Every structure is written in C-alpha cells, then in structure tokens.
Amino acid sequence: MSKLSKLSRRSWTSHPSYIDEGYKSTTLRGPSKNLVAIDPELAELTGPAFGPEAIGALDHDLTRNGRVNGEPIGERIVVTGQVLDDCGNTLPNTLIEIWQANAAGRYVHKKDQHDAPLDPNFLGAGRCLTDAEGRYHFYTIRPGAYPWGNHHNAWRPNHIHFSLFGPTIATRLVTQMYFPGDPLLAFDPIFESIPEAARNRLICDFSLDVTEEGFALGYVFNIVLRGTAATPMEEG
Amino acid sequence: MSPKQTPSQTIGPFFHYGLNPVEANYPHTQIAGSCLVSPETEGECIRLTGRVFDGKGVAVEDALVEIWQANAAGRYQHPNDARVGRALDHSFSGFGRCGTGAQEDGRFSFLTIKPGSGQAGHAPFISVTVFMRGLLNHVYTRVYFDDEVEANAADPVFRNIDEERRSTLLARRCDSPAGVEYVFDIHMQGNQETVFFDL
C-alpha cells in the first residue's frame, strides 16, 4: 500500500513515559500495556492538510484577536521559530495551533477556577501556517504561572500549549513551550516527565534580534517532528 | 547532525477554546468539528460514538478525540494518495475533532461516512488519535467495523493483533430509526485496554 520505511519512529528517548509517578493523573490515564507494533508499510502516511482558508487575518496575533474594548494586559512577546523534521527538512504549510493562560495565570476556559482575573481583551488562542521555509510567527502576551491540584503548593511554570500536524497523522505533536530561567521548571512534574537530556528542547530562547524595538520581547522556539519520506500510494 | 524530536506534553484540561471552540461555545473559529459530512458527501452516513474510560472505568470528560479516514471510495484527501482509480470527494476532508465533555455521559459523537477499503485485501477503518490531561503522549488506535467480519479477518493489521485483544478495535453496529450508529469505547487501561499502536 504505502512505503513508510523512512518514517522516523517516535523517539522514546525524547518523549515522556505514559505513566509518571510525579504527575498523578497519568496513573489512571496512561496505557499500561505495551504499544502494539504496526508494519511501517501498513501505517498511516496521510493526514489532514490545511490551507490559508483555515487561518483568519488576526489568528496569529493574540494581542489583537480577543480585543473587546482595549488592549490585553501584560508583557507583549513575539514567539517565532522554524518547524523541521528529524531528517533535517523544513516543513512548510503546516498548521500550528496555540493556547495559553493570560498574564495573570488564568485561562478563558470555563473550568478554570483559579482566583485570578480574566482579561476581557484576551482570548489566549491562535493559529498559523508555517511559511515556505517552515517558519511561524505569533504575537501574544507572556502567560502567567498558576496553581494546580497535583500536590501541595503545585504551580505550573509559564507555558504556551502548541499543537502541530506535520504531513501525516503519524507526525502529530502536542506539546508545551516554556521560558528560560523559570524557577518553577525544577518543581513541575509535567516538564520533569521528559527524559532529562531532552527537556531543554521545550525551553525557548530569548532573542534580541527577534525583539521588536519599543514593542515586544522576542523568543525563538524551533520544533522538530518525526521525519517522513513517504512514497505515493500505489493503485489497487 | 540531525535535529532531535521535540518532546510531547499533555494537552491539559483547558484546550477547548483553542482546538474545538465552536463546539465548546467560545468566541473563536475552529478548523474542524464533529460533523464531517454534508448533503453532497458520497457514502453511507454513520454516527461514530463512544466514551474514553480511565483505569477505574470512569468516563473521561476532558479528552479530545480526532479521527482521520478515507472517503467512500477508499481514497484519502491527501497529496500522498493520488490514485486516480479512486475518486476524490470534495465534500469530504476525512478529518474530525470532538471533545468528550459536551455530552453528560462523556460521549464523543461524530457524524461521518463509513470509509471504503483503502486497498484490495484491507478492511475499512478509521484512524483515531486521543489526547487528554494525564496523557503525556497521544495514543493512536483504529476503528474496525464489527459487520465486516470477512474483511477484518483478512486485514493485514487486524489479523496480526493477538486474538484476545482484537475485539477492542471493533465498533459495534446499532441500527435505529435515527440511522446507523457504531459504538467504539476506548479503555485506557485494564482487561479491556484498547490496542494502541506504536505508530
């Protein structure tokens, strides 16, 4: 059917284990049996493709896409980077979706009960497509830290959630981007669930080059998906 | 040196306003929802429903389920599938998304079509990806159909699975005056743990 011999495997030295003692809800939600191997030639080599019609004019600018009667509160930032695969190819035209808490550490989500103010001018969700070189660019507000119920005095470090598709459903990735120097990282079981050598791949870099004078601090976050070099499906 | 894969993290509990905002009543557009069909779509219209159960048998109410499938002719809407012998259906993208919190019992529910077999000798199936709080890497599984007994028995993926676990991949057909429904429950753990693929 399809030749997926060049599809990189999920790198289990890069990703967390399903069950992680520190992150309590994994104990009932992570699969307990081994994943079942699938012949690469029989695996999915297709997935949804999204074009410019999926993206609204302000979808990449979270400082503007939720405005009601003014500007959102907080520190404006630029988050940009390149999406690659682990064979070193750049990935153009791939969809990135992001969502995050506001500057006070509160999500718009109805189930977020944290006693911190909502911002009437900030939704905290956006999306964009990578350009011909695989680059993306968001404007947003630096998210605040917030408490959660995992253990006593548990606080999530500042983070932005990312969702990416890549060329097939096998390249799908949902992750979180963290900020350099955040003292909460060392106490966060979600971040610490990642194998130690791979953790710093989720911490963005501050960049004065990306920083926009008089407007917003710049951060660079490159993302690497599994590589694919699939050959077309044969008639049959 | 080749770059290394970016680690996965959980989707967390608060994704709805970013990923399926219309369904969850947030003021934002969405790229896909739980209805994949329009009146023009070719094929047998089906409802695909189910629940996601945790290790204690409790239905998870904050999971995101994504489906991806071929059209009624067995062709995928994707550049890797340019097989002219199978017609594209421009009214069918093949991709859907549904959260499990919208209905009281934690059910997901897609309106789609039954896919055609993607290849001679292969059974029809729908690819399913599940994300949730407490799941650090998403899981991949497949819906096969319980009324495709012969095709399933011949399918090179399905028949390779341990016999006692195959039933976890079978959606149960229920016909009613409302139409054809296939029920596919996903069990994250336990004796009935769903087969998840190392895709």
Image (spheres, coloured by chain):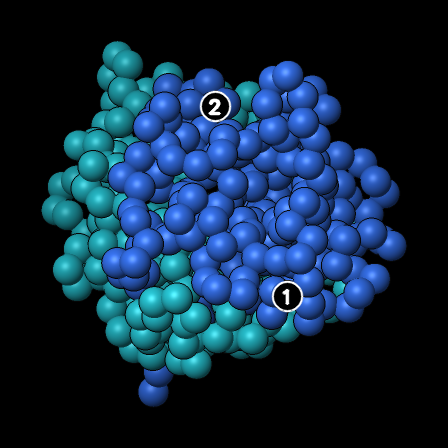
Chain colours: A cyan, B blue
Residue type at mark 1 is Ala
Q: Is mark 2 on a helix, strand or loop?
A: loop
Q: Residue at x 61, y 65 (%)?
A: B155
Q: Where is residue A153 in the image (x, y as percent from the top left)?
A: 70, 42
Q: Real-space Cα distance between discs 1 and 2?
A: 38 Å
**Residue indicated by mark 1:** B154
- Left or right placement of residue B76 versus residue B188 in this view: left
The label number, if any, that marks residue B23 in the structure image: 2
For the question of whether residue A143 can be seen, the reply is no
Residue B59, image x and y in percent?
75, 34
N-terminal-most mark, 1 or 2: 2
Left or right of residue B105, residue B142 in this image: left
The answer for which chain carries disc 2 is B
Write down the chain letter for disc 1: B
| Residue B159 appears in view | yes
Q: Which residue is drawn at 69% across and 36% down?
A: B173
Is disc 1 surrounded by few (<14), some (14 to 19) or many (20+) residues within 10 Å? some
* Coordinates of residue B148 in the picture (x, y in percent): 64, 50
Q: What residue is shown at x 77% (from left), y 68% (from top)? A: B162
Residue A35: mark in rendering: none
